Image: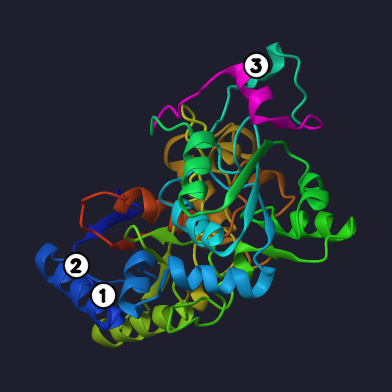
């Protein structure tokens, strides 16, 4: 039997610039990798390209001035609340500059003990020791300092309360910062509220509207159309954006399904095999030490071919070995397990005891996370990932 299962390779590519044909460049890079590494393409191989280079090729950028124009048009530019921003210079600082540049006053509500993706303002054990209830207690900065002092982020060394305050003041706006987890706190203090949370934004909007907030926006409601020649994202707005320069952000890419389908066609035509393709962003996994959940993008994959839809439908080998075939060993055990796998139908195995413990996540979330870990976010220079054998099972020769 074949001993090698899934193989994942990072593929180097040229530095991508605005106007580049990202699908063609990806296909060319993969074909060069085939030749260099003597790779034989197989049906259901997966090619993934990071959203960052897709957005760069599209020129999907927005400036502080363009963001400010959109914010002012949609909020009126008076006193605006900003609820639950993540603690990130890369992800949020330029967005906050754009919001602050549009408004007279900004009231920021920071969630504690951590933001939505796990960046901690204060350790939860310190919160418990201080007798503070994060579900009900809203603190001023003075109250927070009295109880916890100045706390620096362990990875960045930044005090984000001071950092966001200074950033807003530097844009000429007044600022008030509160710490709490009830978004409704902002309603009596503001003319409009922008919910800056990512995965909980629908709930935040619902709660705000439920107490009568008349102007409720999310980051996904800003930059949904071009502003003075800017980039845009009609689905996600400012969500998924990253700092590009001190004055601009790179937005989440558009039309990613079309990009994936074109990559798939180019490589399928070149190989004679069915090659699947996807665009991926942040993976969805949690660091057990820093407690940071990686996924600051609105989705792991904004676009993919149809063959990557759905969830795994797998049997748990160790369950079969320990239970159904606990009295077998060696070749007899192997054959029994292979026969059970081959007997699978296309019907879902959800609820089947032999499938318990398998990962019930979307394939694109699993594969995208694998790709994010492979390519990294630094200087590896491999924005393309090539995967073989992901859909194999124990029976494949």
Query: Which of the two residues, 172 or 86, is positioned nearer the viewer here?
Result: 172
Query: On the rendered structure, is 308 left or right of 12?
Result: right
Task: Tell which circle, 2 or 1, labels the residue nearer the N-terminal end.
Answer: 2
Q: Residue at x 45, y 49 (%)?
A: 170
**Gap in angstroms between the C-alphas marked 1 and 3:** 53 Å
Give percent across and percent down for residue 1.
Answer: 32, 52
| Colour scheme of the picture | rainbow
Mark carried by residue 13: 2
Q: Are marks 2 and 3 in contact (CB under 8 Å)?
A: no
Q: Is residue 111 above or below residue 65?
A: above
Whether 136 is among the magenta residues is yes
**Gap in angstroms between the C-alphas marked 2 and 3:** 50 Å
Task: Tell which circle, 1 or 3, labels the residue nearer the N-terminal end.
Answer: 1
Mark carried by residue 147: 3
At numbered mark 2, what does the secondary structure look like: helix, strand or loop? loop
Q: Which residue is mark 1?
A: 26
Q: Quadrant of residue 10?
A: bottom left
Residue 280 is at least partly visible in this image: yes
At numbered mark 3, what does the secondary structure look like: helix, strand or loop? helix
**Gap in angstroms between the C-alphas marked 2 and 1:** 7 Å
Q: Residue at x 19, y 62 (%)?
A: 12
Q: Quadrant of the C terminus?
A: bottom left
State which region is magenta: 135-155
The extreme right residue here reads 211
At numbered mark 1, what does the secondary structure look like: helix, strand or loop? helix
């Amino acid at each position: 039997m074949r001993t090698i299962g899934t193989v994942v390779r990072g593929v180097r590519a040229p530095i991508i610039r605005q106007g580049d044909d990202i699908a063609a460049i990806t296909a060319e890079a993969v074909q060069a990798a085939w030749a260099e590494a003597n790779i034989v393409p197989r049906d259901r191989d997966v090619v993934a390209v990071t959203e960052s280079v897709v957005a760069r090729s599209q020129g999907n950028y927005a400036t502080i001035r363009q963001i400010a124009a959109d914010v002012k048009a949609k909020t009126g530019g008076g006193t605006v609340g900003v609820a639950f921003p993540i603690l990130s210079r890369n992800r949020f600082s330029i967005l906050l500059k754009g919001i602050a540049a549009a408004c007279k006053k900004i009231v920021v509500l920071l969630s504690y003990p951590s933001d939505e993706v796990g960046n901690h303002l204060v350790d939860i054990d310190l919160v418990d020791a201080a007798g503070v209830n994060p579900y009900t207690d809203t603190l001023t900065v003075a109250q927070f300092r009295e109880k916890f002092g100045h706390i620096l982020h362990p990875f960045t060394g930044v005090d984000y309360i001071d950092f966001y305050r200074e950033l807003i003041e530097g844009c000429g706006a007044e600022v008030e910062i509160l710490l709490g987890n009830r978004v409704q706190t902002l309603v009596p203090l503001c003319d409009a509220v922008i919910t800056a949370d990512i995965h909980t934004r629908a709930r935040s909007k619902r709660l705000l509207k439920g107490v009568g907030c008349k102007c409720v926006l999310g980051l996904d409601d800003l930059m949904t159309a071009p502003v003075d020649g800017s980039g845009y994202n009609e689905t996600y707005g400012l969500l998924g954006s990253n700092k590009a320069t001190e004055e601009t952000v790179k937005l989440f890419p558009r039309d990613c399904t079309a990009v994936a389908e074109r990559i798939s066609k180019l490589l399928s035509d070149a190989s004679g095999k069915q090659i699947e393709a996807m665009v991926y962003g942040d993976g969805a996994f949690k660091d057990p030490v820093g407690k940071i959940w990686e996924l600051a993008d609105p989705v792991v994959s904004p676009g993919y071919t149809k063959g990557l839809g759905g969830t795994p439908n797998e049997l748990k080998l160790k369950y079969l070995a320990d239970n159904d075939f606990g009295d077998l060993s060696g070749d007899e055990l192997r054959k029994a397990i292979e026969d059970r796998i081959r007997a699978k139908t296309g019907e879902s195995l959800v609820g089947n005891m032999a499938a318990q413990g398998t990962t019930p996540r979307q394939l694109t979330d699993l594969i995208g996370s694998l790709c994010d870990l492979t390519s990294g976010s630094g200087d590896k220079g491999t924005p393309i990932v090539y995967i073989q054998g992901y859909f194999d099972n124990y029976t494949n020769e």
